[in-house]
Image (cartoon, helix red, strand yellow):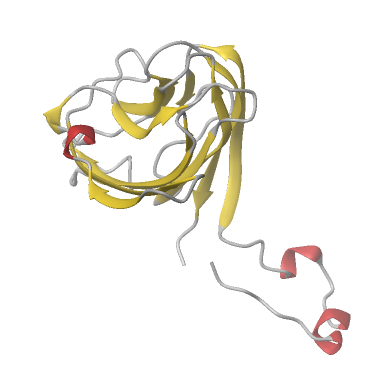
Amino acid sequence: MALVKYNNNSISAVTAAASIPSGALTHIKTLTASSSATLSFVDGSSDVVLDSTYPIYKFEFINCHPANNNVDLQFNLSIDSGSNYNVTKTTTFFAAGHNESGSDGFLTYAANNDLAQSTAFQMLTDGVGNANDESCVGTMFLFSPSSTTFVKHFIATSHRYYYEDYAIVDYLAGYGNTTSAVDAVQFKFSSGNIDSGTIKLYGIKDS
């Protein structure tokens, strides 16, 4: 996202607010959980845009707190406006972590968190604790979801308070193996509700 700088002379020369670039990142929708089984973004529903308007979409999940302990935040894609969340996916996943006592640090490829041509929900981050101060946060980018030529690439980075008192960062990348337009994305925990938390959707304009 380009950073635009103005000096006093350039500001004084502005005659209309529209002359100032609005930036590349546009907020589309915020969903807030309250003992919610799922949070879903469906194109054309409740002011959600998830089509060719933007080439890249960004999701931010903020302090997602599970009702159950030791559960995984997951997502899936839909090509039928959310009637089914079952797009075939192939992914790769690795993680790095460190515990509060300083006795264990690691960097590992997490093969168990990968999918290989699976329609299952994809894990974004696992083992999230449900103590009052435990949650997970992160971002996910979805590229050209409306394309009818290419598969649907996504990249995500997440951080979790692991239920055994670890700080763990998770890295995920992969693709939805479909040339149909993806028009909905759903988030949920692997078990139990999203007790609280916020997920925001943004569109990123062409440069």
Q: Work out whether 107 lies above or below 164.
A: below
* Relative side of 84 to 112, left or right: right
Q: For this rendering, which residue is in front, 64 or 76?
A: 64
Depicted 60 relative to depicted 18: above or below: above
- Identify which residue, 171 or 4, lies in the foreground: 171
Residue at x 84%, y 73% (from the top left corner): 15
Q: How many marks?
A: 0
Query: Residue visible at 49% across and 43% down?
Result: 138
Q: Nearer the viewer, residue 120 or 10?
A: 120
Q: Residue furthest bottom?
A: 9
Q: Quadrant of residue 128?
A: top left
The quarter of the displayed image where residue 176 is located: top left
Residue 63, x across and y down, in percent: 59, 34
| Residue 164 as seen in the image, left or right of residue 142 | right
Residue 160: image location, x then y, percent: 47, 38
Residue 106 or residue 86, whichever sits in front: 106
Please name the residue shown 32% across and 26% down the image: 76
Q: Position of residue 131 (x, y in %)?
A: 58, 22
Kindly identify the residue that appears in the image at 82 percent across and 76 percent down.
14
Return the x and y of residue 62 as percentages of the image width and height: 58, 37
In the rendered view, tell whether residue 4 sits above or below residue 139. Answer: below
143 relative position to 167: left or right: left
